[in-house]
């Protein structure tokens, strides 16, 4: 019985974290751009550009199979953490997982908003 419970918890932990809502991207980052312009609606937002992603699924209409544009608000504490993580991945050319919200609902309108990211 204990073994059954252990195996059940192990499987949930192993595969439960891989489920994601929205889009999913796996690959390397080609560019990171920050907006410090005068437009209050987009000031502080960070844009992540990915070309020829290894894997992309359920992308927003503004994301194609050859170019993926992602953004996040760099003004928040979460955004600052995201910026540090993605910048480290970019500078070391490491593979990243990016989860997006499948929407182009940010000040840019032509990029998908990042929900989460992780370095491989």
Image: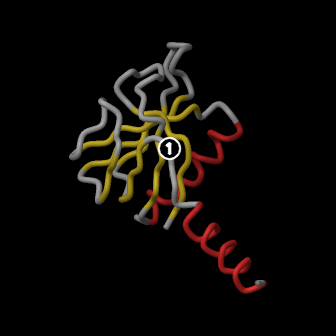
Residue at horizontal 23 percent and vertical 52 percent from the top: 52
Q: Position of residue 29 (x, y in %)?
A: 38, 53
Q: Residue furthest right?
A: 2
Query: Does residue 108 lie above or below 21 as drawn?
Result: above
Which quadrant holds residue 26? Answer: bottom left
Residue at horizontal 57 percent and vertical 54 percent from the top: 85
* Quarter of the rendering occupied by the N terminus: bottom right
Query: Does residue 85 lie above or below 93 as drawn?
Result: above
Frontmost residue, 87 versus 116: 116
Left/right placement of residue 49 relative to residue 116 reads left
Residue at horizontal 33 percent and vertical 48 percent from the top: 57
Left/right placement of residue 7 relative to residue 42 reads right
Q: Residue furthest front?
A: 1
Q: Where is residue 40 in the image (x, y as percent from the top left)?
A: 56, 13
Q: Where is residue 28 in the image (x, y as percent from the top left)?
A: 37, 58
Residue at horizontal 53 percent and vertical 52 percent from the top: 117
Frontmost residue, 82 versus 114: 114
| Residue linked to disc 1 | 21
Secondary structure of the residue carrying numbered label 1: loop
Query: Does residue 103 lie above or below 50 as drawn?
Result: above
Q: Where is residue 119 in the image (x, y as percent from the top left)?
A: 52, 62
* Numbered-mark total: 1
Q: How crowded is mark 1: few (under 14 residues within 10 Å), some or many (20 or more)?
A: few
Q: How is the image coloured?
A: secondary structure
């Amino acid at each position: 019985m204990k073994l059954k419970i252990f195996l059940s918890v192990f499987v949930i932990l192993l595969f439960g974290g891989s489920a994601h809502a929205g889009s999913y991207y796996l690959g390397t980052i080609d560019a990171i751009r920050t907006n410090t312009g005068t437009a209050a609606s987009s000031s502080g937002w960070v844009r992540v550009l990915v070309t020829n992603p290894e894997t992309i699924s359920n992308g927003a209409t503004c994301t194609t199979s050859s170019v993926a544009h992602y953004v996040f608000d760099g003004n928040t504490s979460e955004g600052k953490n995201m910026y540090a993580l993605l910048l480290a991945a970019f500078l070391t050319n490491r593979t990243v997982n990016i989860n997006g919200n499948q929407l182009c609902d940010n000040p840019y309108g032509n990029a998908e908003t990042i929900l989460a990211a992780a370095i491989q």
